Image (spheres, rainbow, N blue to C red):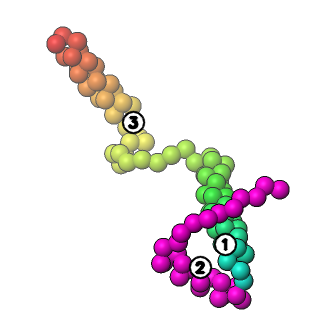
Amino acid sequence: MEQLRVNTLLDDDTLASLHFLRKELGGSSIADTVKYSLVVAARLLQEKKSHEGGKMKALLDSDFIGSGEGAEDLSVNYKEYLYQGLKEHSRLATSILRG
């Protein structure tokens, strides 16, 4: 089992938090309070991370393709919009190439 000795100076706010936690934990030692705090903080972050991953997995599993903004009649007239966009792109490309 790997062990690590930690020696640090705490600012006033962090020290107040340590005293509060020690009191709430029934006067446990500073070492036990710090260990407890690290375990709880790590567990909370792991849960948060797993929930975020769960949301992404649910989205990927849902067969959701995407969403966006555009003309209200895009699903009906998409070919015309595509044609106009390609025509404009072609005009711009031609003017750039001719300099």
Q: Earlier in the sequence, mark 1 or mark 2?
A: 2
Instruction: Work out which residue is located at the far top of the displayed protein and give it.
Output: 98
Instruction: Work out which residue is located at the far left of the displayed protein and give it.
Output: 99
Quarter of image, res 22 = bottom right
Residues shaded magenta: 1-27
Q: Crowdedness of circle 3 by 10 Å Cα count: few (<14), some, many (20+)? A: few
Q: Looking at the picture, how far across and down is residue 64, in whole percent? A: 58, 48
- Judge by depth and name the residue closer to the eye, 48 or 23: 23
Q: SS of the residue at dot 3?
A: helix
Q: CA distance from mark 1 to mark 2?
A: 8 Å
Numbered badge on residue 18: 2
Mark 1, residue position: 34
Instruction: Work out which residue is located at the far right of the displayed protein and give it.
Output: 1
Q: Is residue 24 magenta?
A: yes
Three-letter code, disc 2 = Leu
Three-letter code, disc 1 = Val
* Residue in the picture at 31% in, 29% down: 85
Mark 3, residue position: 78
* Residue in the picture at 61% in, 65% down: 7
* Residue in the picture at 29% in, 29% down: 84
Q: Is residue 67 magenta?
A: no
